[in-house]
Image (tube, rainbow, N blue to C red):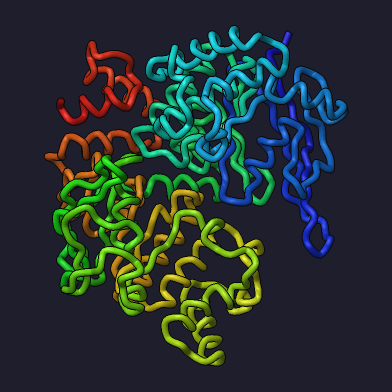
Amino acid sequence: MTDEILRITDLRIAARTEEGEEKILVQGIDLTLHRGEVLGLIGESGAGKSTIGLAALAYARPGCTIIGGEIRYAGTDIRTLSRRERRRLRGRRIAYVAQSAAASFNPAKSLYRQVCEMPVRHGLMSYAEAKKAAAQLFAELDLPSPETFGERYPHQVSGGQLQRAMVAMAMSCRPDILVFDEPTTALDVTTQIEVLAAIRKLVRDHRTAGLYISHDLAVVAQVAQRIMVLRHGRMVELGEAAQILHEPREEYTRRLVSVRAAAAPPAEAAVAERGERLLELNALGAAYGRLRVLKDVTFSVRRGETVAVVGESGSGKSTLARVVCGLREPAGGSVRFRGELLPPTLSLRSRDQLRRIQMIYQMPDMALNPRQRVSEILGRPLSFYFGWPRAKVTARVEALLRMIDLPVEFAARRPGELSGGQKQRLCIARALAAEPDLVICDEVTSALDPLVAEEILKLLGRLRDETGVAYLFITHDLGTVRRIADRVAVMLQGAVVAEGPLAQVFSPPYHPYTEALLASVPEMRLDWLDDTLRRRAGRQGAEGPVIGAAAADRFALGT
């Protein structure tokens, strides 16, 4: 009697291009999964990770087709089932956990309504029974007030709580297999620990099998027993988690490991101060109604300098960026740029002031117009700010493409014809087209795989050195901060709790919250999560469960 629950053999998936040609996305993938086992799927963007994960449900995205192979669940090839039979299987026996819980939940329905929907629809429970089972899952996932938690709406809970609620929704029918598609990528490091611990506990307690999709090797190693490395839709390497981390056999795997391990602690030597002060924030405040989200924020950015702003979700990082850009009016304090007081709102700023502060957004797919060609995307700021003739705009567009290491032929392409890394390079070029003094980078590498993210960081560093532009770099990834920042400002609940040169802030003695952040960065070892949870338990003592952001924050701050 085997405990094998899933076997995929010679899986092949293709997509149809606009020209009508067939493009192979996944080629010859074989994998097995046993009850209580988690298999990690690792690889860069476009490697086929999510495509394979969805194929476990015998599902392909619109425009894609499973053209070959077997997908056997409990011995049955589910590709041979009727559409109705496959729909009965999905959610009930094989469930999916998406990357963005905020985008997946219906904001108009309570969490109870959404978590209970699947078992009721499949006829497994009445609504009252489903509510009782949901409350039990909320308790298992260490969600606050589990009996009433489901009465809240998605916007009334934190990002980590909502991600765990999505895990509860996937577990509502007690499936045999869970597909986790980058479930912690968008979370800050302290929240990520809570979700990882909850996922691992749930898999262990219910003997649920899992496919865990990620581009972070250190994260996958905390929950997966085996790891499959993918590239261009093919398997590069498959092995035990310890072997992949410490003895990778293939060159591509070694590159992934080396890039992930590159976030070493900063040198003790302080970085020499760069040019004159460019941006000065003095006692800056901001509010949404009566809720104060920025409290007396004070620090500066010098010309040619990179200042990183780090902190948990809800710490005020993005609101700070909006105030600097003029998208949010401050509720006190001042913003000075090049020695002059900046008008509080975008509409009051001159065209020159607008030009000198640009922004690169987190999600290039959302920031780029899919209907415009690259030449239009880059040419628009050139025409708007400088009023150049077409010939000069065309020449500058080509120069910008060369600057970001993209072929000039890409000027005729649209965003949909570019990879994730190429689209982010295009966003960088669009910001630099205005020849700004300051560029605000809002989580510009969080959605990218490590190799592409490393290329983007190197590009930003080179462009800073060549153009003298300054960066205000907003991120929750401390590894990224260590590789690019000169100075760092650590934010907690709208206030800056630590600020200064990178080596100073990230070296002992730490501010307690900075220490908690640094201790939450996943390390390339299998026992990292266990050690971190033990340390948290030691700090919390009798305060309650190990996982839980509120308790962790209280102890990290010594309150």
Residue ranking furthest to the left: 509
Q: In this view, does 63 lie above or below 8?
A: below
The quadrant the C terminus occupies is top left
Q: In this view, does 59 lie to the left or right of 539?
A: right
Q: In this view, does 355 lie to the left or right of 430?
A: left
Where on the picture, by quarter, is residue 156?
top left
Residue for point 35% across, 50% down: 475
Q: Is residue 267 visible?
A: no
Q: How many labels does the image show?
A: 0
The quadrant the N terminus occupies is top right
- Residue 19, position as x, y percentages in the image: 81, 65
Q: Is residue 529 above or below residue 416?
A: above
- Residue 384, position as x, y percentages in the image: 46, 81
- Residue 94, position as x, y percentages in the image: 68, 24
Q: Which of 253 and 400 is in front in this view?
A: 400
Where on the picture, by quarter, is residue 526?
top left
- Residue 71, position as x, y percentages in the image: 78, 29
Q: Can residue 534 be seen in this view?
A: yes
Q: In this view, does 71 lie to the left or right of 32?
A: right
Q: Is residue 82 above or below residue 53?
A: above
Q: In this view, does 32 lie to the left or right of 273?
A: right
Residue for point 56% across, 57% down: 365
Residue for point 84% across, 40% down: 68
Q: Which of 153 and 80 is in front in this view?
A: 153
Residue for point 67% across, 15% down: 120
Residue ranking furthest to the front: 289
Q: Nearer the viewer, residue 78 or 26?
A: 78
